């Protein structure tokens, strides 16, 4: 495009030279700063800009301090939409030592004139040629003084995402600004996982005809997307709405989003013609946002006088006013920096002086680079708010008002800013806060859509092109309960088909379709090939027992799963018969041995701790080993409640042991119950881990994704995998030991086990998945609605009723068969045994430390009260006799024990009573002898 524009410029130079002589009569006056303006004065923005720039010129000239006593002179040139006349205007301005040019209005002219501006080094400032492709790298002397269309398209894309739409149709004028704006819109939509479904190009504004618009809108009317983005000029845009109204495209269900051209019509044309008002009802549009200020209100109060009441005010008038002030401030800074307004001849044109062309007028502005630098460093407050350019030479803080055309006027529904996105509060109040672009922070007010609809439109309908959806179905030869194609007929039925039919009944629109079988009918088809037919365009969707797996989701889109399809292992199993020793089944032999050992260990520890103080733990060895001895009753909770154990350490050990026994007893009871309640099957295959570690052959269903999963994910060699085509082949292969087990999806296995109770599922499911309906990634809107319908079927119970009708016809005694109930081993309880063992060890350590301490104290007393001879005889006293020595309890303790036992209803037999009396008398007699 730049090369073509340059070539056109070279070719047109002879023609331009004729006009140079014509317009060279005007000479600039000393002390005057000349600025040119190229506008299409018959347009809305041209009329508004003319009045606004005249007001800016007067305001600047009324204040001598702005330009240091110099006067600003703005010369207007009407290009009348013609690039040719626009170039003539630039050449005319160069005859009057013009230092800057405002305009042009269109991007087409901007691309051409920017090449002239680059060569002549004259800054070109435009507030309406907002094509994003007019980059400073290519056009360094072109400056956009209003937010360019990149930000406007970002705002539209965020609106599309906010309302949860995924596709739009772009209608645009086929010129530079229209094309490049739509390209930018596509990029912004892609960032939000949306897209442009169709691009409708219309002739440029001056050439658009009704038949051109009608032809494109009739195409759009047959498409599924109902979100239409209209990026044109005002003439073509209003013609679009008029034709859309006549075609019934402004009714309920449609969404029209117009770029900022519509806001200029709404603001500047009042009142609107009734036919225009009726045709734009419910449309959304954007308006460049300008914050409220006193200067802005004062300017608006002058507007009728400035415009002579010929045109209403719009935001681009404010940008036109500020553009003049940007130039004025930059020129004043140029003078302050010592710069002057001077021009020099382009030496490259010296060779053309004798050709009769008046090329001497094409002078280069010597201060152009410095003036451009000052313009880009602008930092002022204008009518549009704070005016400053960033490093990309765009205005900082671009923002838009979002307007809804309603009734005879319009209403504000929100704002968009590059800082925080969509909001219902003015952007200025958000600039002091940190940016927050999260979806929860995006808000807009209520919108009245076309057809006076207040509920947000869904954004699409089923395309009205008369073509039924081509739905592929697998032609299965086994498990035909899922998909069954009756022989010799077109009738299709089955579980998957019934779910599909029930789901489409819940769609809010009709869904024409026809089933197309896939497969040769001799074996189950490859489901990957079936799904791939969607990508190649053979099918529009697939209905059947299609598992949702990763490699398929890369090429197609799935609905939510309507049934789980986890992979499981099936293997032969033998029924375990009951025996007289089945009570030992819950525990492993090691568990039984450790439990028995701890019974003895704890009994021995308690006996040691109680032997010196508790009469029930004393006596001859034959009495201690008797079944009625306290060693065994010590372990019973009832004995503990009667306080048979009197020592603190003994009670501590016993409490911990009773806690361990309680847990072991509960676990044993639960496990034993399971052993008797659940039918037990025995098999060497315990699950997928057993199969992986073995070298056994594994069966799988032909056409299933299980083969790829076993080979690629589990690294099982292909030589171990055996394809099987039917339930009969499953059973035969398992019975003949051709395979040790088979792996298949749970729905198939459930049907298989209904007729083959001699097999069972081993282990747990080792994948999680489901079956879903399939559609194209591009046309995935139906999949969203089908997913919603599946959820509805699940919630109202219809999905379960369909499953019961097809998949629960018979009952098999093995239905309740589960995996072998695992025995409880030592791993499950070693922590408890460890705690109990540590408690016993610590109790013994404390006990023996106290005993040695008492033994040492007693020997010290004997040394103090006996002679050396008696000391020598005391050394014969052994430590064992000390250990076996009886330690007496106080009378109060015995009395409390008797009272406690009496209150609890316990009675002491006569023999025990007589023994206690004898012991008390003996103790009293010994004390009397000691006193004597």
Image: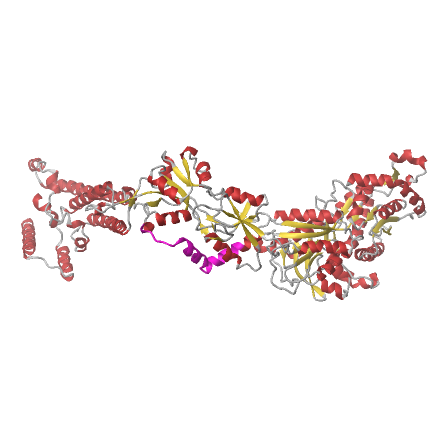
Quadrant into which the N terminus falls? top right
- Coordinates of residue 309 in the picture (x, y in percent): 82, 64
Q: Is residue 215 left or right of residue 808?
A: right
The reply to whether the magenta stretch includes residue 801 is yes
Q: How many marks?
A: 0
Question: Quick check: 347 above or below 632?
Answer: above
- Please, is residue 737 above or below residue 771 in the view? above
Instruction: Give 137 or 667, whichever is nearer the viewer.
Output: 667
Answer whether residue 336 is magenta in the image: no
Of residue 902 and residue 533, the one placed in the foreground of this image is: 533
Between 480 and 220, the residue placed more toward the observer is 480
Magenta stretch, residue numbers: 786-813
Residue 802 placement: quadrant:
bottom left
Scheme of image coloration: secondary structure
The secondary structure making up most of the magenta span is helix
Q: Is residue 344 left or right of residue 599?
A: right
x and y percentages locating residue 337 in the rendered image = 81, 43
Q: Nearer the viewer, residue 508 or 257?
A: 508
| Residue depicted at x 66% and y 48% | 186
Horizontal side of residue 242 vs 310, given as left or right = left
Percent x, y of residue 12? 87, 41
Where residue 571 sits in the image (x, y, percent)? 34, 42
Whether residue 169 is visible = yes
Asked whether, in this view, residue 633 is left or right of residue 6, the answer is left
User: Quadrant location of residue 59?
Assistant: bottom right
**Residue shown at the point (18%, 51%) measured from the top left:** 636
User: Is residue 384 visible in the rendered structure shown here?
Assistant: no
């Amino acid at each position: 495009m730049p090369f073509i524009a340059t070539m056109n410029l070279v070719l047109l130079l002879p023609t331009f030279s004729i006009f140079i002589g014509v317009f060279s009569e005007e000479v600039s006056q000393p002390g005057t700063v000349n600025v040119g303006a190229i506008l299409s004065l018959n347009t809305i923005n041209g009329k508004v800009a003319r009045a606004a720039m005249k007001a800016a010129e007067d305001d600047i000239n009324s204040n001598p301090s702005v330009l240091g006593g110099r006067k600003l002179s703005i010369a207007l040139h009407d290009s009348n939409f013609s690039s040719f006349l626009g170039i003539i205007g630039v050449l005319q301005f160069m005859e009057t030592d013009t230092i800057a040019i405002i305009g042009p209005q269109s991007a087409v002219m901007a691309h051409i004139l920017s090449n002239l501006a680059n060569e002549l080094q004259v800054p070109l400032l435009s507030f309406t040629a907002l094509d994003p492709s007019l980059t400073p790298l290519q056009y360094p002397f072109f400056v956009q003084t209003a937010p360019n269309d990149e930000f406007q398209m970002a705002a539209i894309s965020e609106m599309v995402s906010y309302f949860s739409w995924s596709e739009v149709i772009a209608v645009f004028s086929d010129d530079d600004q229209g094309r490049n704006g739509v390209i930018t819109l596509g990029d912004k939509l892609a960032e939000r996982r949306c897209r442009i479904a169709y691009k409708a190009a219309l002739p440029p504004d001056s050439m658009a005809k009704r038949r051109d618009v009608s032809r494109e809108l009739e195409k759009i009317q047959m498409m599924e997307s109902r979100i239409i983005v209209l990026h044109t000029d005002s003439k073509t845009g209003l013609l679009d709405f008029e034709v859309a109204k006549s075609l019934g495209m402004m009714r309920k269900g449609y969404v029209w989003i117009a770029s900022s051209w519509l806001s200029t019509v709404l603001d500047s044309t009042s009142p609107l013609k009734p036919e225009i008002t009726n045709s734009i009802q419910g449309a959304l549009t954007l308006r460049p946002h300008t914050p409220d200020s006193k200067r802005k209100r004062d300017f608006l109060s002058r507007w009728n006088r400035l415009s002579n009441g010929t045109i209403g005010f719009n935001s681009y008038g404010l940008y036109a006013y500020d553009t003049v002030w940007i130039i004025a401030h930059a020129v004043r800074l140029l003078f302050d920096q010592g710069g002057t307004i001077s021009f020099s001849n382009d030496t490259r044109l010296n060779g053309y002086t004798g050709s009769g062309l008046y090329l001497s007028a094409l002078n280069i502005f010597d201060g152009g680079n410095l003036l451009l630098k000052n313009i880009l460093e602008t930092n002022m407050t204008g009518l549009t708010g704070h005016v400053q350019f960033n490093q990309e030479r765009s205005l900082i803080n671009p923002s838009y008002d979002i307007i809804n055309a309603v009734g005879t006027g319009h209403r504000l529904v929100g704002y968009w800013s590059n800082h925080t996105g969509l909001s219902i509060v003015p952007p200025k109040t958000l600039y002091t806060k940190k940016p927050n672009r999260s979806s929860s922070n995006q808000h807009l007010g209520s919108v009245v859509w076309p057809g006076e609809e207040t509920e947000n439109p869904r954004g699409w309908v089923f395309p009205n092109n008369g073509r039924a959806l081509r739905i592929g179905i697998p032609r299965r030869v086994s498990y035909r309960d899922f998909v069954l194609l009756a022989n010799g007929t077109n009738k299709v039925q089955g579980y998957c088909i019934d779910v599909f039919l029930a789901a489409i009944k819940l769609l809010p629109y009709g869904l024409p379709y026809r089933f197309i079988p896939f497969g040769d009918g001799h074996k189950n088809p490859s489901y990957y090939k079936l799904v791939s037919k969607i990508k190649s365009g053979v099918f529009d969707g697939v209905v059947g027992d299609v598992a949702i797996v990763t490699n398929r989701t890369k090429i197609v889109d799935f609905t939510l799963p309507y049934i789980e399809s986890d992979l499981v292992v099936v293997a032969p199993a033998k029924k375990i018969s009951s025996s007289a020793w089945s009570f030992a089944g819950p525990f492993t032999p090691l568990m039984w041995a450790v439990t028995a050992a701890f019974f003895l260990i704890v009994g021995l520890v308690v006996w040691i701790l109680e032997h010196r103080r508790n009469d029930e733990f004393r006596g001859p060895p034959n009495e201690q080993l008797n079944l009625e001895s306290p060693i065994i009753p010590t372990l019973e909770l009832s004995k503990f409640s009667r306080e048979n154990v009197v020592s603190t350490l003994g009670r501590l050990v016993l409490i911990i042991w009773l806690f361990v026994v309680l847990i072991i007893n509960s676990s044993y009871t639960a496990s034993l119950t399971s052993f008797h309640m659940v039918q037990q099957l025995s098999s060497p295959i315990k699950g997928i881990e057993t199969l992986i570690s073995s070298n056994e052959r594994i069966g799988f269903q032909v056409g299933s994704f299980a083969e790829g999963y076993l080979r690629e994910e589990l690294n099982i060699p292909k030589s171990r995998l055996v394809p099987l085509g039917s339930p009969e082949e499953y059973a035969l292969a398992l019975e003949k030991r051709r395979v040790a087990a088979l792996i298949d999806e749970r729905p198939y296995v459930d049907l298989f086990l209904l007729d083959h109770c001699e097999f069972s599922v081993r282990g747990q499911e080792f994948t999680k998945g489901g079956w879903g309906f399939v559609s194209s990634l591009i046309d995935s809107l139906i999949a969203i609605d089908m997913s919603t319908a599946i959820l509805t079927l699940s919630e109202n119970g219809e999905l379960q009723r369909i499953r019961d009708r097809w998949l629960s016809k018979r009952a098999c005694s093995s239905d309740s068969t589960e995996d072998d109930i695992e025995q409880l081993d030592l791993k499950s309880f070693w922590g408890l045994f460890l705690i109990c063992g540590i408690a016993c060890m610590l109790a013994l350590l404390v006990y023996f430390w106290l005993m040695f301490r008492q033994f040492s104290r007693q020997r010290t007393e004997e040394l103090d009260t006996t002679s050396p001879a008696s000391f020598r005889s005391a050394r014969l006293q052994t430590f064992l006799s000390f250990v076996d020595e009886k330690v007496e309890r106080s009378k109060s303790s015995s009395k409390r024990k008797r009272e406690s036992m009496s209150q609890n209803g316990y009675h002491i037999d006569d023999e025990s009573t007589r023994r206690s009396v004898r012991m008390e008398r003996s103790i009293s007699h010994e004390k009397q002898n000691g006193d004597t």
